[in-house]
Image: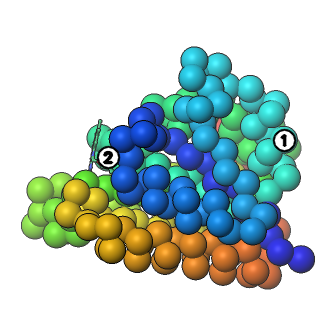
Amino acid sequence: MPRRILVLLAHPAHRRSRANAALRRAAGEVEGATLHDLYETYPDFLIDVDREQALLREHDVIVLQHPIYWYSCPAILKEWLDLVLEHGFAYGHAGTALAGKALLSAVTAGGTETAYGPAGLNRHSLADFLRPFEATAHLCRMRWLPPFIVHGTHLLDAAALARQAGAYQALLRELREAPAAPRPAPPAAAAGRA
Ligand SMILES: Cc1cc2nc3c(=O)[nH]c(=O)nc-3n(C[C@H](O)[C@H](O)[C@H](O)COP(=O)(O)O)c2cc1C
């Protein structure tokens, strides 16, 4: 059975977006993928936790798609993480709702790969800046997938953007068809949390 994909979109100004708009269009063409625009749904940041948790339960692959803002995600996604991934739902002894699901960060960054190299302006790779998301996946017993990263967005012309969008679409299709992973055993550290 195809896996159900939920794409959580977090871009505060979609009308000014080039990169995320292209990725969003590509994701929208993947059969059965649910696109969920957080800024559009919650312009006042009043997140409906029950609705979001129900959406998470209904899907197997959760994609966090957003531009990199200040080495992290736009504010609404942080709010979403803070409120939706509750103890007893997403983590903790009884919090097994997300166990075995996959988490994919699909991000766009103004900085080039060189700027995210050891000698570059940002000194660390984007994979390093995404560690909090990786750790979140681990705590929630989810499978952390290698992130999909579009670097140097300001330098990409229409053809380059279209190639990136095509690669993203192909990845989502692949994830849709991939066999479901077995549910992992709870990590010892997930039972309690400081
Ligand atoms: C508030 C803000 C913060 C940003 N912070 C970063 C950053 O930390 N690292 C980076 O590489 N690019 C940063 N950028 C550039 C965006 O990542 C880039 O414009 C975006 O990925 C392009 O996608 P879009 O066309 O969908 O808007 C920032 C942009 C804004 C507006």
| Badge 2 or badge 1: first in the primary sequence | 1
- Give the residue type at disc 1: Ala
* Residue 38 at x, y percent in the picture: 60, 36
Tell me the kind of residue under disc 2. Answer: Tyr
Residue occupying image coordinates x 83% and y 75%: 2
Residue 26 visible here: yes
- Cβ of disc 2 within 8 Å of ligand 1? yes
Name the colouring of the figure: rainbow
Residue indicated by mark 1: 54
Q: Residue tagged by mark 2?
A: 71
Residue 93: image location, x then y, percent: 81, 45
**Image quadrant in which the C terminus is located:** top right
Residue 156's quadrant in the figure? Answer: bottom left
Which quadrant would residue 29 be assigned to in this image?
bottom right
* Quarter of the rendering occupied by the N terminus: bottom right
Q: Residue at x 84, y 50 (%)?
A: 57
Q: Report the Cα–Cα distance between label 2 and label 1.
A: 29 Å
Q: Is residue 93 above or below residue 109?
A: above
Disc 2, SS: loop
Local packing at callout 1 (Cα closer than 10 Å; few below 14, some 14-19, many 20+) is: few
Q: Which mark is residue 180?
A: none
Q: Tell me what residue is drawn at x 78 percent, y 64 percent.
A: 32
